[in-house]
Amino acid sequence: MIDIHNHILYGVDDGAQSENDTLDMARQAVSEGITDIIATPHHKIQVYENFGPKVIDLTEKVNQLLTEHNIPLKVHASQEIRIYGDVITDLKSGKALPLAGQYVLIEFPSNEVPIYTEQLFTQLAMEGYVPIIAHPERNTELQKNPKKLAELIELGALAQVTAGVVVGNLGHHAQSVAELMIEHQLIHFVASDAHNVNNRNFHMKAAYETIESKFGVDVASRFQENVQKVLNGEKIPYLSPKEIVKSDRTSKRKEKKKKKKFLGLF
């Protein structure tokens, strides 16, 4: 199993704060079946400016630490990049880091999708980059208007849902939005966004089990194949979003109720 969004690097953001925190997270990851983590410390958000060379150096130190403690986990250097106008310039200079190959993890402000997003995503595509939108199910604007996410995907973006949201640990509303997005092929990956082993844990194994149960083995398998493709820098086939209509969720709830009633009669 591969985790493409994780705050395992110590002392750089609101994730792991010490070497021991990093080791605890690594042991937890291995217990869930994770073999590779792409470390994505926050970059260009408030006080966090974790430039590429710093992240690469710390990732090397963390891998050495894991080897010393016989923890079978490989950590790869990247960033969770808060969207900003000069990201392409910084990707080219090495100040900003892709996840691997052409894939770039982009985070929006929690309450909005900036007005220049479509223009920037178009420019990223022209330069050969593929933006992966971090946790759209937790963005207020996308919660209210998931069709906006579909428009960004049609421009070439991909999207990653948080494992903890899938299993219901971050509230019913976010979970409901995540399910809608998965149903309509607006999500391409599951990742932990783990910050520690306490209140912001991995939940990866449980998330894949939940997805397989609710959406089928093909969806769960596709998500796992996609993260492998990211790590390998391979192309992910385009999957067209399904149209979202207002009555979708309501109709499905009514259908489920009818089925339960029908089954209850016999």
Image (cartoon, rainbow, N blue to C red):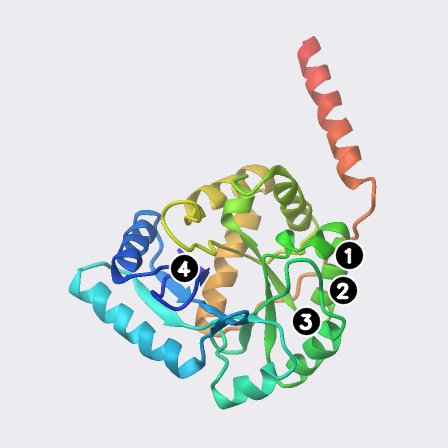
C-alpha span from label 4 to label 2: 31 Å
Could you tell me which residue is drawn at 48 percent across and 46 percent down?
208
Q: Are marks 4 and 2 in contact (CB under 8 Å)?
A: no
User: Is residue 217 visible in the rendered structure shown here?
Assistant: no
Q: Are marks 1 and 2 in contact (CB under 8 Å)?
A: yes
- Along the viewing direction, whichever of 217 and 116 lies nearer the viewer: 116
- Along the viewing direction, whichever of 246 and 259 lies nearer the viewer: 246
Q: Earlier in the sequence, mark 1 or mark 3?
A: 1
Return the x and y of residue 221 as percentages of the image width and height: 51, 52
Q: Is residue 136 above or below residue 119?
A: above
Q: Nearer the viewer, mark 1 or mark 4?
A: 4
Q: Is residue 81 above or below residue 225?
A: below
Return the x and y of residue 222 as percentages of the image width and height: 54, 55
Q: Which mark is residue 156?
A: 3
Q: Earlier in the sequence, mark 1 or mark 4?
A: 4
**Residue 108 position by quadrant:** bottom right
C-alpha span from label 4 to label 3: 30 Å
Q: Is residue 3 left or right of residue 237?
A: left
- Along the viewing direction, whichever of 167 and 256 lies nearer the viewer: 167
Q: Earlier in the sequence, mark 3 or mark 2?
A: 2
Q: Amino acid at mark 3?
A: Gly
Q: Which mark is residue 147?
A: 1
Residue that numbered label 4 is attached to = 15
Residue that numbered label 2 is attached to = 151
Q: Is residue 225 above or below residue 218?
A: below
